Image (cartoon, helix red, strand yellow):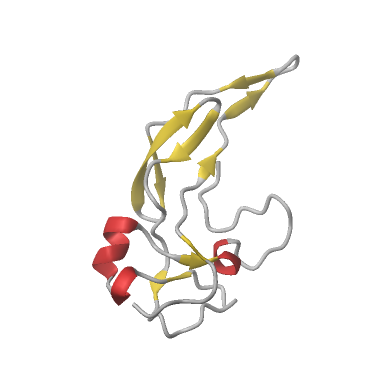
Amino acid sequence: MKFLTALIVSLICFIPSFLFTQDSIKFAPCPQEVKYAGRTYNTVQIGSQCWLKNNLNIGRMIEDSTKQNNNTIIEKYCYYNSEVNCKTYGGLYRWDEAMQYSTTEGAQGICPEG
């Protein structure tokens, strides 16, 4: 795979797992798995936070010589341009693509809702 000069992110998403009550915030148990975009991701609870155990792998693979664009299609790179590597290691995303070109603090990006 050619060296990419821009930041490429392999994502492990954080899934908030808390419930608001009248007096305080109570933390809900982390689900064992999350279904997202046709795939199942295992989760792990670290303290009061719930995280995906696996790197995210969503979107359409593009060649490493192609630029990811703001075109409403989630585009990913795979090691050595091989979809098998995305299935094994997760997709690779430039920061703007991962955040779906939003500069708003707290934006969801391509991570599952939670």
Residue at the spot 72% in from the left edge and 62% down from the top edge: 103
Horizontally, residue 65 falls left or right of residue 105, namely: left
Residue 87 location in percent, x, y? 28, 60
Horizontal and vertical percent position of residue 48: 55, 26
Locate residue 81, reporting x and y percent.
31, 76
Q: Quadrant of the N terminus?
A: bottom left
* Quarter of the figure with the C terminus: top right
Kindly indicate the quadrant of the structure image that contains residue 25: top right
Which residue is most to the top?
23
Relative height, residue 2 to residue 100 (above, below): below
Say above or below: 104 vs 74.
Answer: above
Number of on-image labels: 0
Q: Residue furthest bottom?
A: 65
- Above or below, 89 relative to 31: below
- 107 left or right of 75? right
- For this view, does 104 lie left or right of residue 28? right
Residue under the image location 48 percent in, 23 percent down: 29
- In percent of the image, x 42 and y 77: which residue is there? 3
The quarter holding residue 98 reads: bottom right
